Image (cartoon, grey):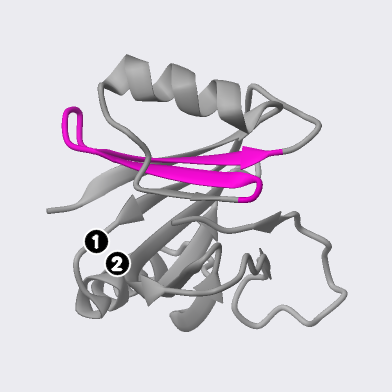
Amino acid sequence: MSRLQLALNVTNLEKAIDFYSRMFATPPAKVKPGYANFAIADPPLKLVLFEGPEGATINHLGVEVESGREVRIAEDRLRAAGLETTGVDDTECCYAEKTETWVKDPDGADWEWYVRKGDAARMTNIVLRPTGAAAGEEDPPAACCT
């Protein structure tokens, strides 16, 4: 089963956790300093919260799948459709070990296609660059989730 992911920037993590816990009748699955995520069954949604100075904005979007194979299938489909991706990588990001690929929409919104493989001890942000882009070629925002 796949589910959409919505990663939001919030100014007060404690208040946001309280609000979304009540809104979706689901407690967070993981809470770390400046970070929380929810695995919501109905509607099927992975909700991720990042605490920072700017709230009420989208951090990034994603599709959570069940296997690395599904990530690679998505990568192949995206590339075949002529979309520029970051390529499939095994990463450690936002307290999780993942296999993922990223793509940007025409307005620059980041979309992550990923499978979570396990927990990680730290919050590591990644810098998104399209496959083949050289370091320093662009300075996209750091993003990560799970």
What x and y, as percent, mark residue 130? 62, 71
The residue sitting at 34% across, 68% down in the picture is: 116
What x and y, as percent, mark residue 18? 46, 21
What x and y, as percent, mark residue 71? 30, 71
Front-most of residues 79 and 17: 17
Q: Residues within 10 Å of mark 2 (few under 14, many from 20)?
A: some
Q: Going by the image, does 44 lie left or right of 122?
A: left
Numbered tag placed on residue 131 in the rendering: none
N-terminal-most mark, 2 or 1:
1
**Residue stretch rendered in magenta on the structure:** 33-51
Q: Is residue 79 magenta?
A: no
Q: Are marks 2 and 1 in contact (CB under 8 Å)?
A: yes
The residue wearing badge 1 is: 65
Q: Going by the image, does 82 lie left or right of 121?
A: left
Q: Residues within 10 Å of mark 1 (few under 14, many from 20)?
A: many
**Which residue is outermost to the left?**
1
Front-most of residues 103 and 12: 12
The residue wearing badge 2 is: 74
Front-most of residues 110 and 12: 12
